[in-house]
Amino acid sequence: MGIFDKQPKDPFISAYKLFDKKIICPNCGNEKFQVRDVLLNTSAMTFFGFDWANRTASALICTSCTRIEWYFDKPNAII
């Protein structure tokens, strides 16, 4: 494959579901999202230097309108 060939699709873009329900963007109706794990910092943990011990959440970013949806439970990718 040369450098000017069509690049493969981003492997991090997918449709997701949580609790057997497909996640759809409430803003535009899109079904494709990028997922990011986000550290939920608290001021007390940061003060004592324990940022690594904070909880994480999953942020789904709509590929159409860029709305961000936050979830404590990690959504499952639909293949």
Image: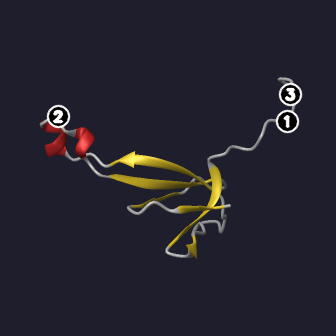
Residue at (25%, 47%) from the top-left corner? 54
The relative height of residue 41 versus residue 62 in the rendered view (above or below) is above
Q: Is residue 71 left or right of residue 27?
A: left
Q: Amino acid at mark 1?
A: Lys
Instruction: Please identify the quadrant where the C terminus is shown.
Output: bottom right
Name the secondary structure under disc 3: loop
Give the farthest residue toward the top. Answer: 3
Q: Amino acid at mark 3?
A: Met
User: x, y percentage for residue 44?
Assistant: 14, 45
Say whether disc 3 or disc 1 marks the residue closer to the N-terminus: 3
Dot 1 and dot 2 residues touching (CB under 8 Å):
no
How far apart, in angstroms, are the residues tagged by discs 3 and 1?
Answer: 9 Å
Q: Is residue 55 left or right of residue 77?
A: left
Label 3, on which residue?
Answer: 1
Classify 10 Å Cα crowding around label 2: few (below 14), some (14-19), many (20 and above).
few
Tell me the number on the disc at residue 26: none
Q: Amino acid at mark 2?
A: Gly
Tell me the number on the disc at residue 6: 1
Say whether disc 1 or disc 2 marks the residue closer to the N-terminus: 1
Q: Is residue 3 left or right of residue 67?
A: right
Residue at (65%, 51%) from the top-left corner? 13
How far apart, in angstroms, are the residues tagged by discs 2 and 3?
Answer: 47 Å
Name the secondary structure under disc 2: loop
Mark 2 vs mark 3: in front: 3
Say whether disc 2 or disc 3 marks the residue closer to the N-terminus: 3
Residue at (86%, 27%) from the top-left corner? 1
Mark 3 vs mark 1: in front: 3
Depth check: give the residue in front, 39 or 53: 53
User: x, y percentage for residue 20?
Assistant: 55, 76
The relative height of residue 77 versus residue 48 in the rendered view (above or below) is below
Label 2, on which residue?
Answer: 49
